[in-house]
Amino acid sequence: MSKADLNNAIVRIFEIVDGEPSQVVGAGFLVSPRHIITCAHVIVDALDISLETSEPPIETIYLDFPLLPEHEPLEATTLKWYPVKENYSVGEMGDICLLQLSTPLPQGAESISIVVHEQYFGRKVRMFGFPSNRGMYDGDWLVGQLQGLIRNGWVQLDSEIGRRSVAGGFSGTAVWDIQENAVAGMMVSIDDSDSDDTAAYMIPAKNLSKALPNLIKTVNHQYVNKKQELIPTSKTYIPDYKYDIFVSYAYCDNEPLYQSNKGWVTTLINTLKIKLRQKLGEEGEFSLWVDYEQGKPEIRLEEHLGKAATLIVILSTGYMESRRCQQEFKFFLEHKAAKSANHVFVLEYDKVEEPFQGSNHHFQFWRHDERGKPRTLAIPQPNPNEQEYYNQIEDLARDLAKTLKTLKNPPKNTELREPVIEQRATIYLAEVTDDLQEYRFQVERYLKEYNIQIIPKTLYYFQGNNANEQLRHAIEADLQKSSLFIQLLSNFKPVRPPGMSTPQLQYECAESVFKAQKELSILQWRDPQLKLNQLTVQKELLNSALVMHIEEFKQYIIQRLKKIEEQKLLQEERQQLKGLQPNSQNESTYQFVFINIIPKDKELANEISEFLLERGIGSGFPLLNKVRPAQKRKDLERNLQDCNGVIMLYDNSLQEWALEQIHHYLRIQSRLKRSIKIIALFNKSPSEEVLLNVKLPNMQFFDCKNFKDNSCLQSFISKLQQ
């Protein structure tokens, strides 16, 4: 429950004078749509009857909800009555009254639940009452702390030092447990015999529940004894496990912040429970264990963590520094062995310097602000408009539900594995800078709806002397499984420790794989609001990126994928007609064209590449980023070795560049494995006379007034296939 729920349940009860409501005499709280609990002695004061009244009064009671918009007083009658007694024994009912409303509730009124405790000491509580001695009939909030049971079964509580104490007018109000977000008891009495110190007492929720068993909603709480062992809130979802989910977190990350009565972890877990129930369905009861009260580590590990099916890690700086948290994580991995990575769900509370390994599920709950500083979402508490926070919880619930369902209904064979689902395609969605994480999540969610597998599943991170080599190898291995390489780019400077990938490295690997296997398409994106003249970092990559709204780009990815799928089917049909297997390495299965360009022509080259790909012809570009001259020469030679034909985008401003490329070809042509059928110079400015003073037998000029009509490209393909 939220703080507002308590506000919506508190009532004030009026004294009756000449049959009409007069001054406030006490409080009560709504426990069902028609029922209110208060103290019997409050009703005695309201009706001005004897304190020794043993039968339920028949007179009408007047009350209202003071923290809701102003409304007429409501009417109620006494339904159940436990009269005031001079002496009580532990567990004996007394000074409790249940009222039944005779008039409808005002808009916004909500009932609240109680929580039953056995251990009281140190629990922080808050109360709202109407102290008559201070004339505060509109209400007054107090904060206090429970101390423990006294002989008559009530619980003593003290106000915080330096604050006002409980006074007359608080009787009947709910004593609200701040951590549990439920009613711990009902205020019943004060002892102000000592003018310097006032003690207050409540009837504990356990007695209220016993007195009114069929009316009060009781919420499950976490601990009932010094060992703090959990009373399961429900059956486990997965057979043979004690708990479906164990939450491992640093206690410092769950301290309630200013104006918040719940910690960050508690708030998130409460929301997750709701979303997970929705994903599992009405019959999907599950058991979740959270150590809210810092139980003994050996009990937590052996009795709880060792018997849990999945682990949620709230990753933070505090978590990484906590020896206890590290023990929990290590303990879980050792018990789950090889399958553990898919059973661990990492929720990043804040940015940690060292990447966290051991999980296939990562959810980032922090973002960089406009100054580049990492900020945790939902601080001090969630904002209904903070959609990013709720999206992450939605994704977490979906992945967690999928894992639980798989564990509950494994395949019939003895080895437990994920259900085999035929993926439509595999797309490499590159890691992004921190400012684009939400966009990456949006793209990933969108593509998964089309049954598309997204890789990589985790961040790359390697250590040691050959870390860079291992990193490049891992990236290229994933790229070789992919049909598309998608990269979202911004003007944000990537900051990565050694052993982690960068946007530049991922792009270089994608180009390398593309040239090697000719089956990987590259798509890069940047936001239209990012202007080229504003770029300070990643200029070469951003300059060649597609510019469109992210929603358009998501649709464009699917369109591009459809073309790739269509082309793949077309190639397979051609191969079958030729008596070839789809995976044959026969050279005649495809041709490769080297599109030699300068960076500013990258977008035009992409159009040409797409046109060729639709016709079963692969293509590639040179390295366009800033590299050493020796690397560029090596890249140029590799492309010339592999290609059947060359396209150069030319105008007279590129005369020197074109001559350099052609003469380099002449120097190495004797070393080429095959002859290049055609070197095509596509003149981008056909109105100008070509000034290039070199002619070769396999060189041909094409005047391309408009590339979109494809006339020069059709002519080039005809020459290539002769």
Image: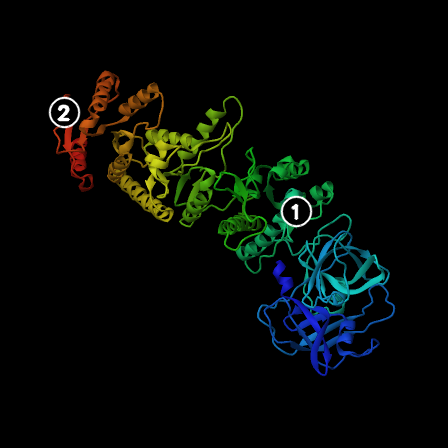
Tag shown at residue 99: none
Q: Position of residue 192 (x, y in %)?
A: 83, 62
The image quadrant of residue 248 is top right
Of 469 and 657, the residue lying toward us:
657
Question: Which residue occupies 28% across, 41% down?
Answer: 567
The image quadrant of residue 332 is top right
Q: CA distance from mark 1 to mark 2?
A: 74 Å
Q: Position of residue 603 (x, y in %)?
A: 28, 37
**Which of the marked residues, 1 or 2, is nearer the chain's N terminus?**
1
Of 461 and 123, the residue lying toward us:
123
Q: Position of residue 348 (x, y in %)?
A: 56, 42
Toward the bottom, the furthest residue is 18
Asked if residue 620 can be seen in this view, the reply is no
Question: Is the C terminus in the top left, top right, bottom left or bottom right quadrant?
Answer: top left
Q: Position of residue 382 (x, y in %)?
A: 56, 52
Question: Which residue occupies 81% across, 59% down?
Answer: 198
Depicted 312 relative to depicted 179: above or below:
above
**Badge 2 local density, few (<14 within 10 Å), some, or many (20+)?**
few
Looking at the rendered structure, the secondary structure element under dot 2 is: loop
Residue position for label 1: 255
Question: Which residue occupies 60% across, 43% down?
Answer: 314
Depicted 638 relative to depicted 275: above or below:
above
Tag shown at residue 691: 2
Residue 718 as seen in the image, left or right of residue 421: left
Depicted 170 relative to depicted 567: above or below:
below
Of 352 and 333, the residue lying toward us:
352
What residue type is disc 2 on?
Leu
Asked if residue 260 can be seen in this view, the reply is yes
What residue type is disc 1 on?
Glu
Residue 496 as seen in the image, left or right of residue 637: right
**Badge 1 local density, few (<14 within 10 Å), some, or many (20+)?**
some
Looking at the rendered structure, the secondary structure element under dot 1 is: loop
